[in-house]
Image (tube, rainbow, N blue to C red):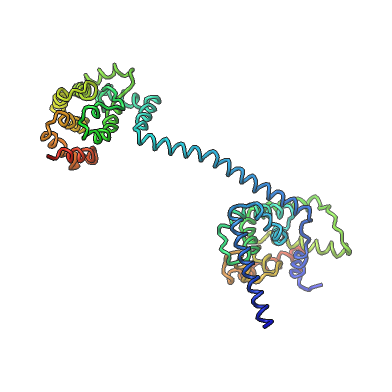
Amino acid sequence: MSNDPLAEATRALRETETASDFEARATRTRVMTGLHQTRVRRRTRLAFLLPVAASLVAVSAWGAVSGQGRRALDKLERLVGITVSATAPSRAKGTPRRPATPPAVTSNSPEQALLPPSYQAEAAEATPIAARAASSARVTASASSSASRADRADPTLSLYRAAHTAHFVDRDPTRAVAAWDAYLSAAPNGEFAPEARYNRALSLVRLGRSNEARSALMPFANGAYGGYRKAEASALLERLEP
Amino acid sequence: MTILGLTMVTQQTLADDAVLADELVLRLQRADPSAVAEVYDAHHAAVRAFAKRLLGDAASAEDLVHEVFVSLPQAVRKFRGDAALRTFLISIAVNHARHHVRAAQRRRRALSAYGDTKSHDSTDPEREARRRELAESLSRALDTLPIDQRVAFVLCEVEERSSREAAEIVGAPEATLRTRLFHAKKKLRLALQTEGLG
């Protein structure tokens, strides 16, 4: 026997018998079961998440390409009441942010139909954005009464709506130019002035008043409104080159 | 000529072993169950012995062994191959041991309170009883140590590993490990004296 109790105890601990073969096999089974469960969990997670992620990507891509995404978002906003609840109180306070009920723009935009073939590509690109501007101004049918309240609060909105109707619904560029001019003279710095100016420029293009159209599009192409319609205006200006 | 031939055969064997080890590690990284089973069969005894000596409790040791091998596919991603796989497994056990030490202490206290009635076949029952008593005293004394000192003592003194290998396992400098060992031994001697073994 050693004189050092620590050395003796250490030796005793070293010689301690380890588990029996049965315990070792039982732990092995536990390990393999644990691994299997981990794999199953991972597979289940992947099987659930991958299709969801793939669908999300596909739907987002389709929505972005077709412009349906924006419309779906608008529908969703209306469904959950974000648009109505966000605009109604502001109208009540007499500070409307959007014209109340401009007519909806269909995906087959009148802009595209009215433009000469050489401009149809640009108009096709511009249409979703125009639709976005218009659809963002849309509210549900139940909001029509609040629209008249909004018009009373801000008379320029009725001018905007009239111009919008002439441009997008009646597809009458002559009347549209006059209506956009009326709106812009009433609200030269109005919230929708940039949209009105761009739509006016488009109407001028349709009427073949190229010089006026060029001067109307120039500020957009030069970035006077930031990135808003910059690319479309540049493309149209290139086509309008004599 | 014969020596040269032997050297070449040995080198070829070592190269084959390295390739096999690499393949095994790759399979482990893919969480291949057969690879884990292979590693378990080869190394479970060493891991279990270490766990039992460190924790001083068979049930907790089994839990630790289980945790080591279940976490192996995840942990092996950090394996660079600069140490033996067995050393790496022990280092995983060290990292997971912290959670099991308290459980082992509680279980050991409960067993000593109610009396461990497990019988042990031995040719010399008296000697076996004395050995068990000493081992249990040391396990109790180990409970008084911080986990780092406890690991250092088990690796260097109980498992008789070199300080270099132990340092590799715990991921600390050798000097640090030797300091931990010094303090561990000092405290253990005191604890054993308190138990009447000094």
The image shows residue B84 at horizontal and vertical percentages of 63, 66
Tell me where residue A220 sits by quadrant. Answer: top left
Report the residue at 36% width, 36% height from top. Answer: A64
Image quarter hosting the N terminus of chain B: bottom right
Mark yes or no: residue A153 visible.
Answer: no
A140 relative to A37 in the view: left or right = left
Image quarter hosting the C terminus of chain B: bottom right
In the picture shown, does residue B90 fall above or below A115? below
The image shows residue A140 at horizontal and vertical percentages of 33, 21
Mark yes or no: residue B44 visible.
Answer: yes
Return the residue nearer the eye: B65 or B12. B12
A186 relative to A24 in the view: left or right = left
The image shows residue A122 at horizontal and vertical percentages of 24, 36
Return the residue nearer the eye: A183 or A155. A183
Tell me where residue B121 sits by quadrant. Answer: bottom right
The image shows residue B125 at horizontal and vertical percentages of 88, 62
A81 relative to B156 in the view: left or right = left
Total numbered labels placed on residues in the image: 0
Q: Residue furthest top?
A: A145
Q: Residue furthest bottom?
A: B1
Q: Residue furthest front?
A: A117
Report the residue at 27% width, 27% height from top. Answer: A109
Report the residue at 33% width, 18% height from top. Answer: A141
